[in-house]
């Protein structure tokens, strides 16, 4: 084995090793999720070298420089103030979703007008209109980190795969017998998973356009799907009150996470793939151990339905958004509530951390989005101007641009 080069991953902190083994180029990642401003870099370097034979003593100085770069980045104080950059009259009918590519240079919007649009973030210009669906385009995604493909899931029961550069349609995935309401690319961008009102998930081959398997086991509509960071597991959350964890290679169900007393609204893996967080109409968020499939804890406190959950990138915090108009941040190790985010005057439908894990943005029916300090719960900024409820929001990879999508048919870029 021979090390070719180091690559840095800022969020979450990590070092990627490009190396050659038996004449073939390979990569492996060293996750440094605990790295912070107080980490002793010399000790960390020694620990990494002791466990990683590719990094020999001759690479120690280079390793220390990379660790210093990572530490400098995670230690940056985050005092960014967001100003309205553009109002985009995106569609003639209401939006359904918005999302960025990994670099944040482009974003996409889905709509009830049966289209998905690709936009340039820097200029606010529309690059492509992806037309072809015969009903609402409800679920959309970039194949991050690559960002060269877009998947759209529709109430017309199909999913389409598009070239993000040209707007050309590669494939139409047919096979569901009811509306597609959620989808996700696997991290390698070789598969698309779709979840449907027909109670099934399907996996589709990005290259051939063929169906690789159908995942059956839920007894009600599937509302969310997501892959873990390794790409070998998929979770599906359903209105049947359960979350299923599937092995991607075989299509076998590994765990049924049973315990919620209401419909599941949202479910996510943490970055390490050791834990799942789920939000439910039963007003709770549950944390599950992935190895055993058992519920570790039930996070209570909300007085109404939990509509969204999100981990920060290191997985040390989880945030819940509720119809009670508040969000709550919990520590995933102690299960203690870190803070409550109070101030909105309507239900919260979406919540996300910035990549640094220091800020949270919430989208509310009160027509505003808010930026919060993730540790203190202080509201740092109110993003005002939409004429109807905001139902979705997202940070870009650098954490210095926010997009909000509203029922007023516009999205707003804040930077």
Image (spheres, rainbow, N blue to C red):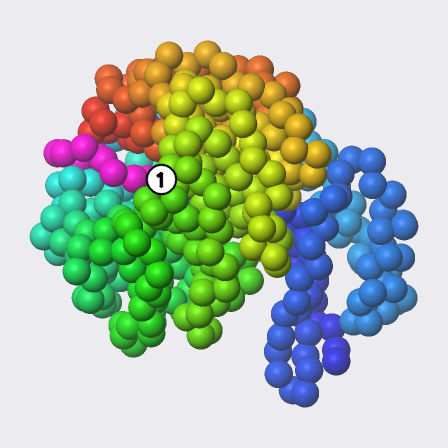
**Vertical order, 214 against 62 (above or below):** below
Q: Quadrant of the C terminus?
A: top left
**Vertical order, 275 against 113 (above or below):** below
Magenta highlight on residue 98: yes
Give the residue drawn at x 31%, y 20%: 365
In this rendering, the count of numbered labels is 1
Give the residue drawn at x 43%, y 50%: 243
Q: Quadrant of the N terminus?
A: bottom right
**Vertical order, 65 against 345 (above or below):** below
Q: Residue lying at the far bottom in this picture: please name it.
A: 22
**Residue nearer the viewer, 134 or 327:** 327
Residue 323: x, y in percent? 38, 23
Residue 233: x, y in percent? 50, 62
Q: Please give left or right for residue 12 compared with residue 123 in the image.
A: right
Give the residue drawn at x 74%, y 73%: 3
Give the residue drawn at x 17%, y 36%: 91
Residue 314: x, y in percent? 64, 44
Residue 66: x, y in percent? 75, 52
Name the secondary structure under disc 1. loop
**Residue nearer the viewer, 221 or 415:** 221
Q: Residue lying at the far left in this picture: please name it.
A: 134
Q: Is residue 216 visible?
A: yes
Q: Please give left or right for residue 6 compared with residue 151 in the image.
A: right
For label 1, the residue is 263
**Residue 411 figure quarter:** top left
Q: Please give left or right for residue 290 compared with residue 200 in the image.
A: right
Q: Please give left or right for residue 135 compared with residue 206 in the image.
A: left
The magenta stretch spans which residues? 89-99
Mark 1 residue crowding within 10 angstroms, few (<14) / some (14–19) / many (20+): many
Magenta highlight on residue 332: no
Q: Is residue 194 visible?
A: no
């Amino acid at each position: 084995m021979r090390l070719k080069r180091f690559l840095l991953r800022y969020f979450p902190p990590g070092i990627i090793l490009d190396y050659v083994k038996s004449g073939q180029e390979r990569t492996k990642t060293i996750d440094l999720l605990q790295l912070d401003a107080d980490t002793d870099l010399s000790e960390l370097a020694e620990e990494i070298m002791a466990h990683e034979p590719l990094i020999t003593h001759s690479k120690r100085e280079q390793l220390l420089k990379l660790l210093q770069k990572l530490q400098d980045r995670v230690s940056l104080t985050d005092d960014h103030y967001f100003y309205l950059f553009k109002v985009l009259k995106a569609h003639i009918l209401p939006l359904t979703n918005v999302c960025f590519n990994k670099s944040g240079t482009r974003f996409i919007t889905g709509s009830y007008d049966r289209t998905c649009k690709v936009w340039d973030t820097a200029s606010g210009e529309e690059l492509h209109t992806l037309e072809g669906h015969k009903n609402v385009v409800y679920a959309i995604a970039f194949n991050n980190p690559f960002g060269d493909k877009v998947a759209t899931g529709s109430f017309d029961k199909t999913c389409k795969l598009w070239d993000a550069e040209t707007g050309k349609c590669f494939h139409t995935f047919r096979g569901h017998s009811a509306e597609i309401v959620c989808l996700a690319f696997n991290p390698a961008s070789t598969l698309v998973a779709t979840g449907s009102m027909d109670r099934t998930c399907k996996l589709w081959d990005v290259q051939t356009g063929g169906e690789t398997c159908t995942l059956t086991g839920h007894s009600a509509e599937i509302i969310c799907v997501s892959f873990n960071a390794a790409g070998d597991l998929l979770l599906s959350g359903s209105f049947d009150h359960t979350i299923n964890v599937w092995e991607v290679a075989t299509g076998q169900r590994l765990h049924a996470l049973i315990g919620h007393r209401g419909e599941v609204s949202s479910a996510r893996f943490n970055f390490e793939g050791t834990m799942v967080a789920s939000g439910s109409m039963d007003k709770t968020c549950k944390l599950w151990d992935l190895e055993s499939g058992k519920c570790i804890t039930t996070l209570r406190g909300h007085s109404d339905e939990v509509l969204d959950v999100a981990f920060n990138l290191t997985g040390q915090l989880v945030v819940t958004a509720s119809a009670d108009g508040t969000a709550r941040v919990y520590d995933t190790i102690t299960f203690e509530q870190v803070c409550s985010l109070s101030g909105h005057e309507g239900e919260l439908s979406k919540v996300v951390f910035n990549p640094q894990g220091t800020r949270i943005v919430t989208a509310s029916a009160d027509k505003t989005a808010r930026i919060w300090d993730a540790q203190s719960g202080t509201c740092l900024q109110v993003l005002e101007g939409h004429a109807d409820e905001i139902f979705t929001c997202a940070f870009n990879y650098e954490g210095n641009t926010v997009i909000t999508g509203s029922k007023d048919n516009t999205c707003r870029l804040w930077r």
